[in-house]
Image (spheres, helix red, strand yellow):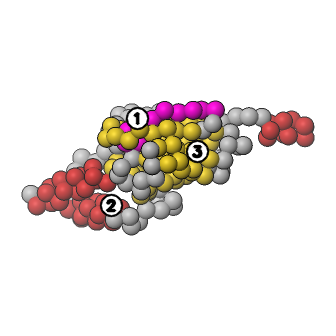
């Protein structure tokens, strides 16, 4: 029994995932866990899988090389975009989409959005994130978690996992997109 536990602990499996979101073209060397960035304006992304022995991801760019630590098991987001990524865990709830929203609820959404754009109220406990360019952030230990990029929409329907729980899906936007959404919300308040 002890030998089986030791063998399972030593077997090379996926222990970490790093989703890289970039501004510009990227090429990946899976063997060395290296991302080569050609800066630009086009959104690109790739997912790297790491084992327990892999401790970092390196980004090579015209500005030099930078190494990002990936110490623990889980899913990480590496932001090499030109803008801050703002995100949150999608709450599917169990009541369906609301058919209307009160002025008080809208004011709360506006206030929360303003704070998040300013880097306030981002926290692991709230599952809200403010990830500035050239940083990496661990989001979850759930290797099945999904990250939705700034230019994709949240899936229209999802299935519960084998434990009967909603999937863990994180939605990210750029700070620019969040500011535009905030302007639209404020305009809606004035009507």
Q: Where does the N terminus fall, quadrant-wise?
A: top right
Look at the numbered discs 2 and 1 and tell me whether their residues touch, using CB distance below 8 Å.
Answer: no
What segment is highlighted magenta in the picture? 21-31
Q: Does the stretch in magenta take in 24? A: yes
**Element carrying mark 3:** strand
**Is residue 179 rendered to the left or right of residue 6?**
left
Look at the numbered discs 2 and 3 and tell me whether their residues touch, using CB distance below 8 Å.
Answer: no
**Where is mark 3, residue-wise?**
57
* Tag shown at residue 175: none
**Element carrying mark 1:** strand
- The Cα atoms of the two marked residues, 2 and 1, are separated by 26 Å
Specify the principal SS of the magenta part: strand
Query: Does label 3 or label 1 sit earlier along the sequence?
Result: 1
Residue drawn at the location 31% of the way across and 44% of the way down? 97
Where residue 75 sits, quadrant-wise, is: top right
Residue drawn at the location 13% of the way across and 57% of the way down? 187
**Where is mark 2, residue-wise?**
117
Residue drawn at the location 38% of the way across and 64% of the way down? 119
Question: 140 or 35: which is nearer to us?
Answer: 35
The 10 Å Cα crowd at callout 1, few under 14, some 14 to 19, many 20 or more, is some
**Where is mark 1, residue-wise?**
25
Q: Relative to residue 182, is residue 170 depicted above or below? A: above
């Amino acid at each position: 029994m002890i030998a089986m536990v030791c063998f399972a602990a030593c077997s090379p499996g996926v222990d970490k995932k790093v989703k890289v979101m970039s501004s510009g073209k990227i090429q990946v060397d899976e063997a060395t866990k290296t991302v080569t960035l050609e800066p630009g304006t086009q959104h690109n992304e790739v997912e790297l899988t790491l084992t327990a022995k892999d401790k970092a991801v390196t980004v090579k760019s015209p500005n030099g090389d930078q190494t990002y630590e990936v110490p623990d098991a889980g899913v990480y987001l590496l932001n090499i975009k030109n803008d801050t990524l703002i995100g949150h865990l999608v709450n599917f709830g169990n009541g369906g989409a609301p058919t209307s929203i009160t002025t008080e609820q809208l004011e709360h959404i506006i206030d929360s959005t303003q704070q998040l754009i300013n880097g306030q109220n981002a926290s692991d406990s709230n599952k809200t994130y403010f990830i500035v360019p050239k940083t990496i952030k661990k989001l979850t230990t759930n290797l099945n978690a999904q990250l939705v990029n700034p230019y994709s929409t949240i899936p229209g329907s999802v299935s519960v996992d084998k434990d009967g729980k909603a999937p863990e899906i994180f939605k990210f936007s750029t700070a620019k997109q969040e500011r535009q959404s905030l302007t639209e919300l404020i305009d809606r308040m004035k009507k």
